Amino acid sequence: MIEHWRQILERYGQSITLYRPDQEEGIVCKAFLQPVQEQGQSFFQRLPTPLGLARQDRWICLGGPEMALNELGDGYLAWGEETFTVRSAQPVYVGDTLVYWWGLLAVRDGA
């Protein structure tokens, strides 16, 4: 199962870079990134705050077992012109084997 997932990520995944707070250089990984499609009239991508507009959009990330999104801490992910912080992360197992990471990301404003 892990080998199939790696092949899918390698062929179809986006190249992202993980930046951990204790490392100067990022680690390039493959993952799937997709914006969360909100259903409802109360959702807006940008909302006014006392300090100006703040982005509210969220993204889903599916990445390989090496990503350990729960250990990113104050680090971030970069993809193209966007940078993301991890809001929530869960490992996904098949039996006792970690197959991939599921993460809910928020766009970092002004990064």
Image (cartoon, helix red, strand yellow):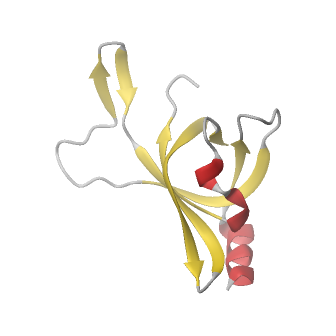
Give the vertical position of 63 relative to 20 (above or below).
below
Residue 36 lies in quadrant = bottom left
Residue 95 lies in what quarter of the image?
Answer: bottom right
Quadrant for the C terminus, please.
top right
68 lies left or right of 85: right
Whole-percent x, y for residue 68 in the image: 66, 57
Residue positioned 28% across, 21% down in the render: 48
Q: Is residue 43 above or below residue 4?
A: above
Residue 72: image x %, image y %?
64, 45
Q: Is residue 79 visible?
A: no
Asked whether the viewer can see residue 34, the reply is yes
Residue 37: quadrant of the picture: bottom left
Would you say 10 lies left or right of 73 here?
A: right
Residue 111 placement, left or right of 60: right
Residue located farthest toward the top when viewing the structure as drawn: 51
**Residue at x 65% of width, y 37% of height:** 75
Residue 89 pos. (x, y %): 52, 56
23 is higher (above) or lower (below) than 71: above
